């Protein structure tokens, strides 16, 4: 490895190093209360190395590719580095109080989460199938352990469910990768694209051959697990319900963002030329339509807020997939918004939104211990600030203007309409209308229902800061979307 | 370009509401400061309207910030402006916003929040009429849901949460189609600008109506037209999408019913005029003229169905709510005259626009009066009432004025708009217009019958108020009369001198139908 390679993978190494450091600190330090603070401060290191790669302050970073082309630190990867680091910091900040309920395990919790984060950072940087597979495993295994953290029956069930399903999904992914490798003789995404255009193809078969089609379907299925796309959604509500809420927040945002990053990269880098795009666009569009509809319908009857939010993230994944499917025929040339740009903006906005929602839920439920929607009754009076932040987040999930959720949906659906998928946009917006019912039900519980007790709930200051920042992002980037859009645009120049 | 007066008119209520909610020390301060800010808003809207009335020409009072979303693919501007079509509705929103704030002075429950939401609602509705950027229009159009949901849920009566949720779901359902259509129109034309505007250099920047003419659209024009139609028909509301209206109107607090019937329904009609009529003039393959027959039938059904259901109502508020369905049918009938000759088309559209303005003032007044009756009698159940005239004659007089205007008595504004609609529609769709005319006859029936059963007769019927309660009824407080007088003035002013509005509307409509 050259010095250049070290600079390129420095963010991932720093993240993993931080996680290892936390394990040691947990053993060495007497005062374990500062572990969380240590973790948040420590995140400055991977952030610094990522910024360094973006701006090119130190070292030789002109060529973003490293380790013989397996890893790249292009703008696209860095965009997700920032997102992942920000999300992790917010989740850790907001869960310090929550972690106090598990005094012996604080260090492990943080370390496992950061290991998973370093896997995600690697995942978004990988542009070679084996590297993708390895980093995907690195993200999944710590999560399985974290899901079982409470050691109760539900928690263990959640962990086991995640582990088994994740293993099946990995197997499918690997199987698909083998097919692609068999047809193209390479695991490098760019070379795959080259070879696919070279090898003789049957024009009547999708992707030029049913074999490649099978490979693509299997790969998409493997990632679909991570994105929580139907039919891989069934683990979501159980895991969200059984695992510690901070983990659910982390999973719903960071894990999903990483999975979307890698599917965008694989589809656009390895299958991004003209006849191929049309082939997978239809597949993804169908997945999107089914996912948003099923997620929404299942969310309607939920009573547990974490299960409800679990199904809500499923339907949100459906909206995002609509953006992935929107490979517009005239993107670039006509200057219209490309689907992926909408997805990146959506993911950023969704990170703010879902963090605002989950962190508010953590702030309330870890005091009341009641995770039913009716447990939020009267929170508008008992905890007005948190209730307001939660409302802002829910309105953004629903997509009410002028929140960031509205802008995201507008961008994604406009990309869909632009690439001729007007039916998908219609299904999407009708689903949005349906989702009003269950999002507003939470608002209704907080503001219009009578609470069981009038005792005010005071939120922890650090948690409030993290939640407030997320909610402020929802409003600011909804009213003034240009900064995020520029960032997304710049990140996509490589595709 | 930035004159600032429209921006001030749109955002002053919400900004004032926020400042008041944070800074006011007592409920009393909240009340008076909110009322004062609504009066200032009305004054601003009056300045905008009279400024346009004096010199009705094109688009005026433009506030424009081009780089709101400068990204290729969603180039939306912050663009406010008024033309002949929107100027009267700006005035209407200012007027009813003021009336609603004044009429809420008896609210005692969570006063701070109440006025905050009411003022935000005024801002959102004002924004709908002032926006000339289609995305901005959509944003205001949807945003209005939040304050409305809160206002009905918290301060409503009856089954407020059910009604509020129903209102939200219906409107969001329509809004969903609106969003797709908005995006499709943008992608087809490359602009969100709803009208042509002069540029700094003196040339003309084409808006959607010019660019969409004859252009290849991303989806069939008929499909986009029907998407817009669904969205606005929910709001108007038009049969068979009217279902949310009676519940929401009945369960909302008085002032909110005034806003709901007075201006929120007009957002639907305004959208029909500006978008369904304005954009689909020369579209390829399908124009608004092709749909006029369907619109006429829908209008006739809406009018008759609404009127027949209205007669059967026993709750005063529900009765007025259902009469709105019937009266909004006239708006659609006027629009359907677009298929006719130049004079009939422009007359019909003008009538439709007039009907919206007059219905806003008339129904607003009717809801105010029902609210005053309910405050005193504590019931709106018609068979339990009776003989109110003897105890509360002042309320009775203005109730009668609202009723007469509603059934279209000459001298009131209701007469002017109905005659305009029917003159035009009869020429083009004589059958549908003939049927719809029965709606007017039935209106006389339900209005007079209600007045007779509630205000006249010997006294309250069995099961209603006791004799002591009846004797203790007090007539309106002078302060209650302020909004009542304001709306009555508008009704008579337009009834006696309709050119006040028709001249303004005409400039807007002529520019629209070209």
Image (cartoon, grey):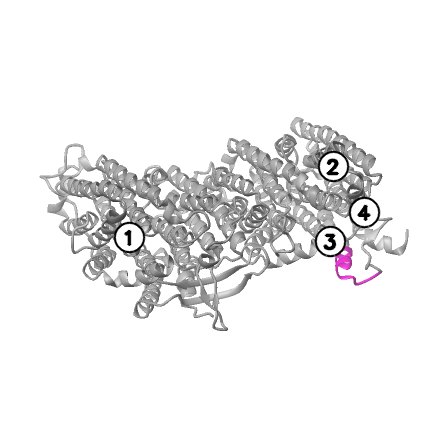
Instruction: Please name whichever residue, B194 or A287, is drawn nearer the observer in this view of the structure.
Output: B194
Q: Residue furthest right?
A: A1
- The span from disc 1 to disc 3 (Cα, nearest Å) is 56 Å
Q: Residue at x 30, y 59 (%)?
A: B95
Question: Against B410, is B234 above or below?
Answer: above
Q: Nearer the viewer, mark 4 or mark 3?
A: 3
Write down the residue under mark 3.
Answer: A494
Write down the residue under mark 4.
Answer: A21
Q: Nearer the viewer, mark 3 or mark 2?
A: 2
User: Does the segment drawn in magenta span residue A56?
Assistant: yes
State the extent of the magenta-drawn residues as a range: A48-59
On the image, the x and y values in percent for residue B131 come to: 43, 59
- The span from disc 4 to disc 3 (Cα, nearest Å) is 35 Å
**Are the two marked residues, 4 and 3, in contact with CB atoms closer than 8 angstroms?**
no
Question: Against B512, is A109 above or below?
Answer: above
Q: Badge 1: how crowded within 10 Å, few (<14), some, or many (20+)?
A: many
Is residue A411 visible to the viewer in this orientation of the structure? yes
Question: Against A223, is B350 above or below?
Answer: below
Write down the residue under mark 2.
Answer: A208
Question: Mark 1 falls on what kind of element?
Answer: helix
Is residue B367 visible to the viewer in this orientation of the structure? no
User: Does the segment drawn in magenta span residue B436?
Assistant: no
Do dots 4 and 3 share one subunit? yes
Write down the residue under mark 1.
Answer: B348
- The span from disc 2 to disc 1 (Cα, nearest Å) is 59 Å
Q: Residue furthest left?
A: B458
């Amino acid at each position: 490895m050259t010095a250049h390679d070290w600079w390129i993978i420095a963010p991932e190494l720093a993240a993993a190093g931080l996680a290892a450091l936390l394990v040691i600190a947990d053993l060495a330090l007497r005062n374990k209360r500062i572990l969380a603070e240590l973790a948040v401060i420590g995140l400055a290191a991977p952030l610094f190395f990522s910024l360094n790669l973006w701006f090119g302050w130190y070292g030789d970073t002109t060529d973003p590719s490293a380790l013989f082309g397996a890893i790249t630190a292009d703008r696209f990867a860095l965009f997700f580095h920032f997102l992942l680091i920000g999300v992790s910091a917010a989740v850790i900040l907001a869960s310090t109080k929550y972690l106090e309920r598990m005094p012996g395990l604080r260090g492990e919790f943080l370390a496992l989460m950061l290991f998973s984060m370093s896997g995600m950072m690697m995942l978004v940087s990988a542009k070679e199938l084996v590297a993708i597979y390895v980093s995907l495993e690195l993200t999944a295994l710590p999560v399985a352990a974290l899901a079982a953290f409470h050691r109760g029956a539900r928690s263990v069930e959640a962990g086991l469910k995640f582990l088994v399903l994740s293993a099946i999904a990995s197997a499918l992914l690997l199987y698909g990768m083998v097919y692609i490798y068999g047809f193209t003789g390479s695991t490098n995404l760019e070379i795959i694209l080259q070879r696919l255009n070279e090898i003789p193809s049957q024009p009547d078969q999708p992707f030029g051959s049913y074999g490649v089609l099978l490979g693509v379907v299997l790969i998409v299925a493997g990632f679909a697990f991570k994105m929580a796309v139907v039919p891989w959604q069934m683990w979501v509500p159980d895991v969200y319900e059984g695992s510690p809420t901070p983990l659910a927040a982390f999973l719903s945002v960071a894990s999903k963002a990483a999975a979307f990053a890698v599917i965008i990269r694989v589809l656009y880098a390895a299958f991004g030329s003209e006849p191929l795009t049309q082939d997978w666009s239809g597949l993804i569009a169908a997945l999107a339509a089914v996912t948003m509809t099923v997620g929404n319908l299942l969310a309607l009857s939920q009573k547990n807020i974490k299960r409800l939010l679990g199904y809500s993230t499923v339907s949100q994944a459906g909206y995002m997939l609509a953006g992935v499917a929107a490979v517009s025929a005239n993107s670039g040339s006509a200057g219209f918004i490309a689907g992926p740009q909408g997805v990146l903006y959506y993911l950023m906005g969704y990170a703010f939104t879902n963090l605002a929602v989950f962190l508010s839920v953590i702030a309330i439920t870890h005091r009341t211990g009641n995770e039913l929607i009716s447990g939020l009754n009267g929170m508008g009076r008992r905890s007005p600030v948190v209730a307001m932040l939660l409302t802002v987040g829910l309105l953004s999930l629903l997509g009410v203007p002028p929140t960031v959720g509205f802008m995201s949906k507008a961008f994604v659906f406009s990309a869909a309409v632009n690439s001729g998928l007007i039916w998908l946009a219609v299904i999407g917006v009708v689903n949005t209308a349906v989702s009003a019912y269950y999002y507003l039900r939470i608002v209704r519980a907080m503001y219009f229902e009578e609470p069981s007790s009038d005792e005010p709930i005071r939120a922890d200051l650090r948690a409030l800061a993290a939640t407030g920042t997320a909610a402020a992002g929802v409003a600011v980037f909804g009213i003034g979307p240009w900064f995020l859009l520029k960032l997304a645009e710049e990140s996509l120049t490589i595709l | 370009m930035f004159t600032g007066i429209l921006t001030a008119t749109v955002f002053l209520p919400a900004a004032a509401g926020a400042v008041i909610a944070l800074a006011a020390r007592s409920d009393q301060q909240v009340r008076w400061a909110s009322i004062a800010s609504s009066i200032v808003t009305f004054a601003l809207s009056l300045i905008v309207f009279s400024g346009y009335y004096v010199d009705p020409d094109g688009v005026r009072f433009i506030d424009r910030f081009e780089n709101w979303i400068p990204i290729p693919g969603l180039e939306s501007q912050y663009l406010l402006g008024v033309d002949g079509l929107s100027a009267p509705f700006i005035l209407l929103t200012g007027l009813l916003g003021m009336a609603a704030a004044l009429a809420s002075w008896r609210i005692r429950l969570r006063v701070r929040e109440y006025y905050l939401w009411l003022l935000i609602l005024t801002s959102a509705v004002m924004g709908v009429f002032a926006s000339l950027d289609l995305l901005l229009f959509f944003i205001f159009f949807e945003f209005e849901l939040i304050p409305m949901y809160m206002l009905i849920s918290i301060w409503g009566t009856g089954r407020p949460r059910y009604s509020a949720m129903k209102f939200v779901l219906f409107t969001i359902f329509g809004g969903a189609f609106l969003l797709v259509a908005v995006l499709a129109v943008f992608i087809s034309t490359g602009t969100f600008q709803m009208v042509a505007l002069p540029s700094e250099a003196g040339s003309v920047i084409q808006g959607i109506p010019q660019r969409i003419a004859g252009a290849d659209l991303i989806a069939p024009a008929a499909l986009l037209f029907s998407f817009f139609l669904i969205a606005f028909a929910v709001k108007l509301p038009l049969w068979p999408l009217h279902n949310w209206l009676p519940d929401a109107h009945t369960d909302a607090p008085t002032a909110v019913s005034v806003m709901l019937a007075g201006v929120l329904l007009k957002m639907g009609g305004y959208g029909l005029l500006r978008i369904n009529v304005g954009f689909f003039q020369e579209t390829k393959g399908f124009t608004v003229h092709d749909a006029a027959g369907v619109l006429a039938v829908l209008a006739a059904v809406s009018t008759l169905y609404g009127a027949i259901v209205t007669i059967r109502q026993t709750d005063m508020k529900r009765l007025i709510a259902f009469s709105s369905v019937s009266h909004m049918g006239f708006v659609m009938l006027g629009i359907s005259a677009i298929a006719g000759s130049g004079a009939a088309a422009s007359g019909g559209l003008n009538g439709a626009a007039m009907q919206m303005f007059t219905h806003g003032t008339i129904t607003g007044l009717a809801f105010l009066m029902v609210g005053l009756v309910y405050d005193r009698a504590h019931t709106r159940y018609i068979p339990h009432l009776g003989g109110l005239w003897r105890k509360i004659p002042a309320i009775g007089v203005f109730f009668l004025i609202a009723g007469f205007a509603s059934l279209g008595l000459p001298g009131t504004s209701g007469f002017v708009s109905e005659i305009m609609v029917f003159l035009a529609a009869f020429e083009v769709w004589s059958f549908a217009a003939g049927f719809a005319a029965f709606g007017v006859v039935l209106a006389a029936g339900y209005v007079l019958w209600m007045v007779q059963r509630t205000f006249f007769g010997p006294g309250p019927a069995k099961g209603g108020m006791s004799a002591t309660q009846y004797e203790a009824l007090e007539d309106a407080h002078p302060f209650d009369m302020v909004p009542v007088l304001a709306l009555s003035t508008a009704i008579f002013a337009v009834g006696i001198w309709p050119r006040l509005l028709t001249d303004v509307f005409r400039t807007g409509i002529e520019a629209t139908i070209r």
